[in-house]
Image (cartoon, rainbow, N blue to C red):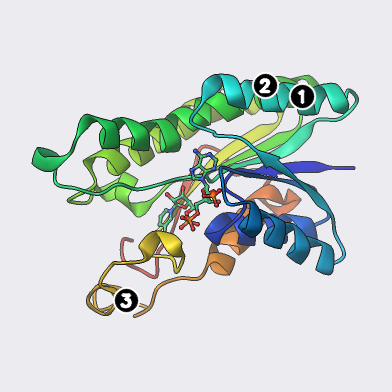
Amino acid sequence: MQYALVTGGSRGIGRAVALKLAQMGYFVLINYQSNDEAAEETLQHIREAGSDGELMKFDVSNHDETEQALQQWQAAHPDDYIEVLVNNAGIRKDNLLVWMNPDDFEHVLRTNLFSFYNVTRPLVASMIRKKNGRVINIASLSGMTGLPGQCNYSAAKGGLIAATKALAKEIGKKNITVNAVAPGFIQTDMVDGLDAEALKKQIPLNRFGSPQEVAELVGFLASPAASYITGECISINGGLYT
Ligand code: NDP
């Protein structure tokens, strides 16, 4: 059995990635924070496609809770390891910096960036032992260009891109690749409330992307076809930033 963990796998991009990895033959561990119904639905989609998976509910922004959940899984699977990790869970809490309260700054940093540390560190240890692994971080266009109203989110995603490059250099010799994917506007719950018509006009392909389109790229990075790609941040944004 080959295992993949997708954080934030209950909805949106994470759900599409979980399904893609399941189709590639992985047993998918679907992490999420609170939406039991959506997580069950992801698992159901995976089973309908003839694959299998398991739900893992924990808050990736919480170090101790994450460590405990991963330790429990490892104790129950002493001979196994998680070969593919997709750090996808994320939130945004937009506001201009002058109006941004400290909780919203910190919450976004903890969920989008500290989670990378919380989840990746314990799992990378077994990848190193096995001399095999893939880490794929879902960053954002916002982390590459900076977007107004997103000082917190841009900082978190920019930090995630830098951490991707640093970790790739640390563990490349162990046959582990570490890459980031930077989506533009993707049609999920996260973009609810944005002025889609106005935004589409700025996108050369004139539409938002789909979670499935992002999942195809993540699937490629997880596949043997991408074995010589590491330390990269690959944009998927309809030409908004190229
Ligand atoms: P959604 O809002 O659709 O889904 C977010 C997912 O993250 C849910 O599964 C949610 O779980 C989970 N999650 C949130 N906080 C935590 C937490 N503390 N612990 C565990 N799970 C958590 O988001 P998207 O699918 O749109 O986004 C996925 C990733 O892609 C994010 O990192 C986002 O920043 C990034 N991204 C998205 C873009 C877009 O346009 N949509 C553009 C660029 C990047 P639950 O269901 O339990 O709430």
For this rendering, which residue is in front, 186 or 175?
A: 186
- The numbered disc on residue 13 is none
**Spatial distance from mark 2 to mark 3, Cα to Cα?**
45 Å
> Residue 231, position in %: x, y?
51, 37
- 186 shown above or below 27: below
Q: Earlier in the sequence, mark 2 or mark 3?
A: 2
Quadrant of the frame with the N terminus: top right
Name the kind of residue labelled 2 in the image.
Answer: Gln
Q: Is residue 140 left or right of residue 213?
A: left
Mark 2 is surrounded, within 10 Å at the Cα level, by few (under 14), some (14 to 19) or many (20 or more) other residues, namely few
Q: Residue at x 75, y 49 (%)?
A: 224
**Residue 171 place in picture, x, y as percent:** 62, 24
CA distance separating discs 1 and 3 = 46 Å
Q: Determine whether the residue tagged by mark 3 lies in a helix, strand or loop.
A: loop
Whether pointer 2 and pointer 1 mark residues with C-beta atoms closer than 8 Å, the reply is yes
Amino acid tagged 3: Pro
- Please determine whether, in this image, residue 62 is positioned above or below residue 156: above
The residue where tag 3 is placed is 204
Question: Which disc number belongs to residue 68?
Answer: 2
Report the quarter where the C terminus lies.
bottom left
